[in-house]
Image: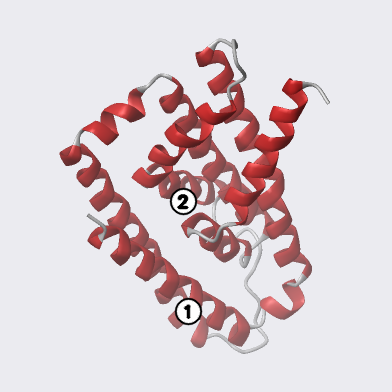
Amino acid sequence: MTPMLTTLVAFLGACTLVAASPGPSTVLIIRQSLHSRRSGFLTVLGNETGVFVWGVVAAFGLTALLTASEPAYDVMRVVGAVVLVGFGVQTLRAARRTRKEPEDEAAPDGVRSGWASYRAGLLLNLANPKAAVFALSFLPQFVPDGAPHLPAMVGLAALWAVYEVGYYGLYVWFVGRMKSLLSRAGVRRRLEQVSGGVLLLLGVRMALDG
């Protein structure tokens, strides 16, 4: 196996471990997928746009400015916490509305606009300063020796984003396959309550994580 192929395999393996780690993006993608596959997949595309943006920012060395400035990092951390809490509250409100629906009434596909779903994934990722710091520490480890740093980093960021589209797409597909069960108002309400509570707690944790 050539050094380039070895590096690529190691990188994709690391990407799998990163994607498999539970986090706000995973919770939001599953939550959006409860409404429709379209909503879930567009949320994935928004999230991975954010991943690519942070990768490019790290490639140009701009993330280092964020980590070097404590006030700038704190501002982003507070903004990220507000975004997470906002998503959590929104999800809990949706769970309350679901309680008023007939038990056999399913959530109709296409209720949410494509832009709203894409924007939700993008906003959640871009509002998380930890995603920026992680990209800065993660990508350089896989730049091959002697390779031009900027093109290699941008290429790895693109590969990372595309790979995660496929990975999280499996989540969307699985939720879609379980639609007959998950579309029941009672089940959907419980899942909304759990995902809303998790997003709310993650937001509070980010706010307190100085």
Q: Quadrant of the N terminus?
A: top right
What scheme was used to colour the molecule? secondary structure
56 displayed left or right of 38: left
Q: Which class describes the residues within 10 Å of circle 2: few (<14), some (14-19), or many (20+)?
A: many
Q: Taking 171 as reference, is 135 left or right?
A: left
Residue count near mark 1 (Cα–Cα under 10 Å), binned few <14, some 14–19, many ≥20: many
113 over 71 or under it: above or below: below
Total labels drawn: 2
Q: Is residue 200 above or below residue 142?
A: below
Residue named by callout 1? 193
Front residue (pair 67, 29): 67
Q: Nearer the viewer, residue 181 or 150?
A: 150
Q: Earlier in the sequence, mark 1 or mark 2?
A: 2
Q: Secondary structure at mark 2?
A: helix
Quadrant of the drawing holding the C terminus: bottom left
- Label 2 belongs to which residue? 120
Q: State how far apart marks 1 and 2 are (Cα).
A: 18 Å
The location of residue 37, given as percent across then percent down, is: 69, 57
103 is higher (above) or lower (below) than 42:
below
* Residue drawn where x is 64% and y is 68% of the image: 108
Q: Position of residue 66 (x, y in %)?
A: 27, 33
Amino acid on which the number 1 mark rests in the picture: Gln
Please, what is the three-letter code of the amino acid marked with disc 2?
A: Ala
**Residue 8 sits in quarter:** top right
Task: Tell me the tag on residue 175.
Answer: none
Q: Which one is nearer the viewer's eye here, 27 or 71? A: 71
